[in-house]
Amino acid sequence: MMSVLSKLKGKTIVLGLATALATVAVCPAFASEATTTIEVADSFEVAVNDIIDGVDGKERVVSSFDDGRYATVSLKDAVNPSTCPHTEIMGMGKKYQQKVSFNKSDSTYCYKYRYWEEGRCVRCGKQGFKIYDASWTNVKHKYKLFGNTCTECGYVK
Ligand SMILES: [Zn+2]
Ligand SMILES: [Zn+2]
């Protein structure tokens, strides 16, 4: 577990900064005036056994990390008796993006994304866990020059 933590040290600092920015971004006025992509912390604190919307539908939180990341198992998998009872999950290195559209409900932002990584149990090697980053990054709508329709989602200014 120590080696996992030390490997993640650099990452933790980046996330810490993101969280600091996020606290400012909660104010809607600030968000609409921002000119660059900003991080937000709509990544509420999660607890073990919480059910979250993951890339695999509903997922149950099995453990959380000091830096706010947390590991989940798909609910489909959670009812499987062969699921391991351990909670020491480590990342397998490859990062993916989870992207969630605002479905044109936001005048500034088009979609948000966060990174997740496949995880496996440190003790028994079981795979199929996902480790989610704590914070999301909001991305603004994209318009062509003089255009008023977002080229990404179709939102009209
Ligand atoms: Zn858009
Ligand atoms: Zn295990």
Image (cartoon, grey):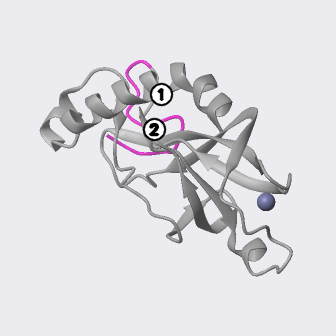
Name above or below for residue 18 compared with residue 28. Answer: above
Label 1's element?
Answer: helix
Q: Can you identify the residue that label 1 sits on?
A: 12
Cβ(mark 1) to ligand 2 < 8 Å?
no
Nearer-the-camera pick, 80 or 36: 80
Nearer-the-camera pick, 3 or 105: 3
What type is the residue that disc 1 sits on?
Thr
What type is the residue that disc 2 sits on?
Asp
Nearer-the-camera pick, 149 or 100: 100
Using the image, tell me which numbered label, if any, was put on residue 112: none
Label 2's element?
Answer: loop
Residue at (27, 29) in percent of width and height: 21
| Span of residues in magenta | 145-157
Q: Is residue 106 magenta?
A: no
Q: Is residue 143 visible?
A: no
Q: Is residue 41 visible?
A: yes
Residue at (67, 52) in percent of width and height: 88
Residue at (37, 55) in percent of width and height: 45
Quadrant hosting residue 91: top right
Q: Main secondary structure of the magenta part?
A: loop
Q: Position of residue 133 (x, y in %)?
A: 53, 41
Q: Is residue 132 left or right of residue 111?
A: right
Q: Position of residue 89 (x, y in %)?
A: 69, 49
Q: Is residue 94 left or right of residue 139?
A: right
Q: Position of residue 107 (x, y in %)?
A: 30, 44
**Tag 2–tag 1 contact (CB < 8 Å):** yes
Using the image, tell me which numbered label, if any, was put on residue 67: 2
Quadrant hosting residue 63: bottom right
Q: Position of residue 156 (x, y in %)?
A: 37, 44
Name above or below for residue 156 compared with residue 22. Answer: below
**In the rendered view of the protein, which quadrant contains the N terminus?**
top right
Residue at (63, 47) in percent of width and height: 131
